[in-house]
Amino acid sequence: MKKKMNYLIILLTTIFIVGCTNAENASIKDGETDPQEVTTINTSKNSETEEVTAKVADEPVVEETPTQPNNELFSGYKLIEVDGGDLSGYREPNAVVDIGFEGREYWAFTNEYGQLIRVIADEIVLQDERTEPVTSSGRYYSDEAKVPGVERADLDEGHIIADSLGGVSNAYNITPQNSTLNRHGDQAYMEDAIRKAGGATNFEAIITYPNTETQIPSHYKYTYTIKGNKIVDEFDNVNPDEINKSLGLTESKSTNSNKSTSSNKSNVTEEISSVDTDGNGQVTIKEAKAAGYSMPITSDHWLYPYMRDNDNDGMVGE
């Protein structure tokens, strides 16, 4: 009887264990997700992703506005910064430099030999001595870059764009230029015309050289627009007085009046040189006073054409 009871207990225990195991398996199966349903969910997500991608692809691409200057204009040149008062005469080859004073954009270009070959500006903005740091002689800087060639007695440190027109004094705005041409010749007349017009637009200077070894130009060509009129000034880097003399344009031929006129011009040239102490072709109020002239200088005074009348009222130094 005791054996039978033991068998019965073992049998019941076995049945109980098997029953629990089946219940756990059933519970696990109930908690699993049907594989087909998982596939359906994933397919749905992929579809949504594809739809979002398609929408993004359909939207127009917005290009960022470039912060650098016109790449096409500067193609082939290295854009560098040079201090406006740098006295070094060195120029980097194939470089482009902004030579405008305080925010003006005047672009200067050099070739592979370091020669200054081109200067451009959309607009020439005149110097304003009331708001800008200008010396008593009308300069932004006390001196100009020592480009090779300026050591010659007959050559000036000539600005392509003058101080009075907003240009700086480093080597990218300076070429060795004949002194008479720079102070009293075509270069001076061109600068004076722009000053009197209150500025200019579409400015371009093309500078050429006799060879690749020198920094002394042989020819200048200026193109600019004043009050809607396109102007082209073109001249060689020579003494205009000597050219005129060789052409017989400065010699008196017949009358005493011609001799008198020639003599007067000579006297004026000598006299302006004594007043224009820094030799830049422009007489300042300080220079005129130092030479003994009282203010104001009116439009009928011989000094007037060589001075700046900022308000154009026919008087300087009033």
Image (spheres, rainbow, N blue to C red):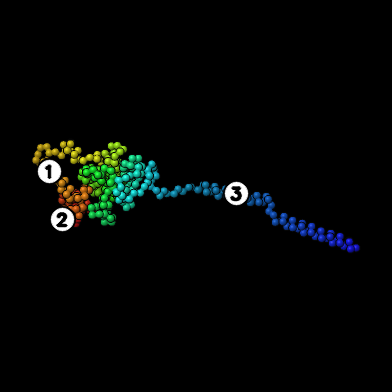
Q: Residues within 10 Å of mark 2 (few under 14, many from 20)?
A: few
Q: Nearer the viewer, residue 80 or 230?
A: 80
The tag on residue 263 is: 1
Q: Secondary structure at mark 3?
A: helix
Q: Which quadrant of the view contains residue 131? A: bottom left
The amino acid type, in three-letter code, at marker 3 is Asn
**Dividing the image into 4 quarters, which one contains the N terminus?**
bottom right
Q: Would residue 127 be visible to someone looking at this image?
A: no
The residue that mark 2 highlights is 294
The amino acid type, in three-letter code, at marker 1 is Ser
Residue placed at 23% from the left, 49% from the top? 196
**Dividing the image into 4 quarters, which one contains the C terminus?**
bottom left
The tag on residue 46 is: 3
First of labels 2, 3 by sequence position: 3
The amino acid type, in three-letter code, at marker 2 is Ser
Q: Secondary structure at mark 2?
A: loop
